[in-house]
Amino acid sequence: GDSVTQTEGQVALSEEDFLTIHCNYSASGYPALFWYVQYPGEGPQFLFRASRDKEKGSSRGFEATYDKGTTSFHLRKASVQESDSAVYYCALGPNTNKVVFGTGTRLQVLP
Amino acid sequence: EAAVTQSPRNKVAVTGGKVTLSCNQTNNHNNMYWYRQDTGHGLRLIHYSYGAGSTEKGDIPDGYKASRPSQENFSLILELATPSQTSVYFCASGDAEGRYERLFFGHGTKLSVL
C-alpha cells in the first residue's frame, strides 16, 4: 500500500543552522505530497503541498521539491529559529480520499 | 479561517466504560476524519466520513465506532474503553476530493483510560 518514510525521531539544531528532514514515499500513480507542522498543544496544520514532478512547495521559509525519480519530498530551511521547534509530518495524497502520514520528526532548535 | 472544534480537550475514563469524543466543523467540508496520535506511530486513521450519514473504516477501526449525524458533526465512540486506547485523538475536515485534499485539524482530545 501507499506509505511515507521520513527522518525518524528527533533532530536537534542550533539557531541559524540549515535544516533537512528527509521524506520518501511509495505510491502507485501520481500522488500529491504535503508537509504539515504541529506545534505543542495544537493539531497539525498544513504547511504546503506539491502535485507534480519538479514542483517546489514553500511556506514560512520552508521548502521542498517533488522528485518523482527519487520518490522524495525533503523539507529544507536555510536558517532555523527557536520558534520552528515542532513536529513535522510528511504526507501523501493518493487517488483515494485517505491522506497517508509519515511518523513525524520532532525538531528542537536550541537558542 | 477554517475551524474544527473538539470536545472534551481532556478525558479520563475507566476500563469498560463508554467514551464519546465530539467534533464540530464550520468549514462546510464533506470529508471528516478521526486520527489517533502515538509516539512512534504518528497519525493513524481510525474512521472517516464522506458526508452526513456516511462512515467508513480507516486503518485501525477495531474497538471504535463513528457517527456522522450532520455535515458539521462527527463523533468517535469507544463502547468498551481499554487502556490501549489511551492516546491523543484528532479530528479533521478535508477541503477537496482526491489527492489534493488539505486537512484542517482540531486541537485534539487527550484520553486516558485507567
Image (cartoon, grey):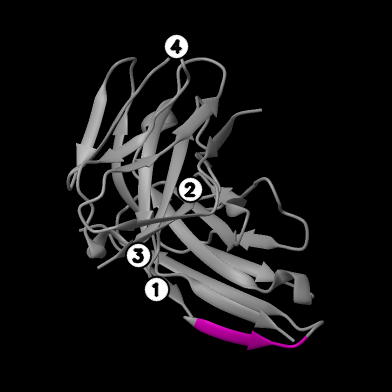
Q: Are marks 2 and 4 in contact (CB under 8 Å)?
A: no
Q: Which class describes the residues within 10 Å of circle 2: few (<14), some (14-19), or many (20+)?
A: some
Q: Residue at horizontal 33%, vertical 17%?
A: A52
Q: CA distance from mark 3 to mark 2?
A: 29 Å
Q: Is residue B19 visible?
A: yes
Instruction: Check the residue under mark 2 and report the chain it is in.
Output: B
- Discs 4/1, front: 4
- The residue to which callout 3 is attached is A39
Furthest toward the top, the residue is A69
The circle on residue A41 is: 1
Q: Amino acid at mark 2?
A: Gly
Q: Quadrant of residue A45?
A: bottom left
- Discs 2/4, front: 4
Q: CA distance from mark 3 to mark 4?
A: 32 Å
Position of the C terminus of chain A, as image quadrant, is bottom left
- The residue to which callout 4 is attached is A69
- Discs 3/2, front: 3
Q: Earlier in the sequence, mark 4 or mark 1?
A: 1
Residue A51 left/right relative to B36: left
Q: Are marks 3 and 1 in contact (CB under 8 Å)?
A: yes
- Discs 1/2, front: 1
Q: Are marks 3 and 2 in contact (CB under 8 Å)?
A: no
Q: CA distance from mark 2 to mark 4?
A: 37 Å
Q: Position of residue B90 (x, y in %)?
A: 50, 63
Q: Is residue B100 above or below residue B60?
A: above
